[in-house]
Image (tube, rainbow, N blue to C red):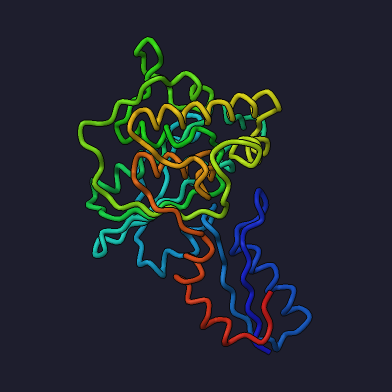
Amino acid sequence: MNILIAADSFKDALSALEVCQAIQAGILRATPAAKIRICPLADGGEGTYAAIAASLGLEPVQIATLDPLFRPITATYGYNAQEETAFVEMAKTAGLQLLSPKERNPLITTSFGVGLQIADAIRQGTRHVVLAIGGSATNDAGIGMAAALGWNFLDKNGVALAPIGSNLTSITSIIPPTAVPEVRVEIICDVTNPLFGPTGAAHVYARQKGADDAAIAELDSGLQHFAQVATESGYPCDPHYPGAGAAGGMGFGAMCFLQAELKRGIEVVLHLLDFEEKLGWADMIV
């Protein structure tokens, strides 16, 4: 019997590879003669880089960057020099798993480290960035990422604000960099939520990132306010576009500042892994 094991990660517990290996061990204990292939999966969240690095011919690039609380860390993104393509996994710099439960608070976390990775990839010669945005610890609408790429977000007094979720309500103007990055960006994500509202980023996902009821209300108000300021500043992105609320609004921010195209993560990953061929081989799928 040919058995295909294709599992995603178990959040805060096991990576996709570890899940697949555990299932494989159990099957072989019961049926030693089984022929097994494992195919770790991801849908745009943590583990996506590991799942598709070989298929995209990515070489790891390690850089000094920042975690969601602005602390120095070293993180990896993937780069294919021949294709001038970089793959950046948001969870590696702005991921929930980088923080202990006590540290999780989307009012003060940032996606700045993601922008530092993108900036480094552009310096390497990247013309095409694939950005996987699941598993985030942030609710900053992508202003952290944008700040690392040269944007400034000012309050009513013209003072630059730290790019964190609690400051979204204080933004009154957006100052672009002198040179906007010339790079094509594809976002892969696993949700279709709008930016704000009952099914938006804050109400659906902020609680698992450490927010209480008051913080959720504050964040949702901030996302609404930021969408209005973005439109008035010449970034007419649709906050109701499916996926605009992904990763605490990173979907919206990436569309505004990088003209990113949003794609369903699982469809991209399955295509890159040639999953149809694997299905044809299998008698049973776990």
Q: Relative to residue 15, is residue 195 depicted above or below?
A: above
User: On the rendered image, what quadrant is the C terminus found in?
Assistant: bottom right
Question: Which quadrant holds residue 27?
Answer: bottom right
Q: Is 28 on the left-hand or right-hand side of 57?
A: right
Decide: is 163 above or below 183: above
Q: Position of residue 196 (x, y in %)?
A: 57, 36
Quarter of image, res 4: bottom right
Q: Which is more toward the observer, 76 or 127?
A: 127
Left or right: where 90 falls relative to 10: left
Q: Name the residue at 46% across, 32% down.
A: 227
Residue 163: percent from left, percent from top: 44, 27
- Name the image quarter holding residue 34: bottom right
Tally of numbered tags: 0
The answer to whether residue 100 is seen in the rendering is no
- Taking the spot 56% from the left edge, 38% from the top edge, the residue there is 137
Q: Position of residue 9 (x, y in %)?
A: 62, 58
Q: Where 12 falls versus 239 (above or below)?
A: below
Q: Is residue 256 visible?
A: yes
Considering every residue shown, the one lying at the far top of the view is 157
Quadrant of the frame with the N terminus:
bottom right
Q: Give whichever of 5, 141 is nearer the camera.
A: 141
Q: Position of residue 280 (x, y in %)?
A: 57, 86
Q: Give the residue drawn at x 29%, y 31%.
A: 150
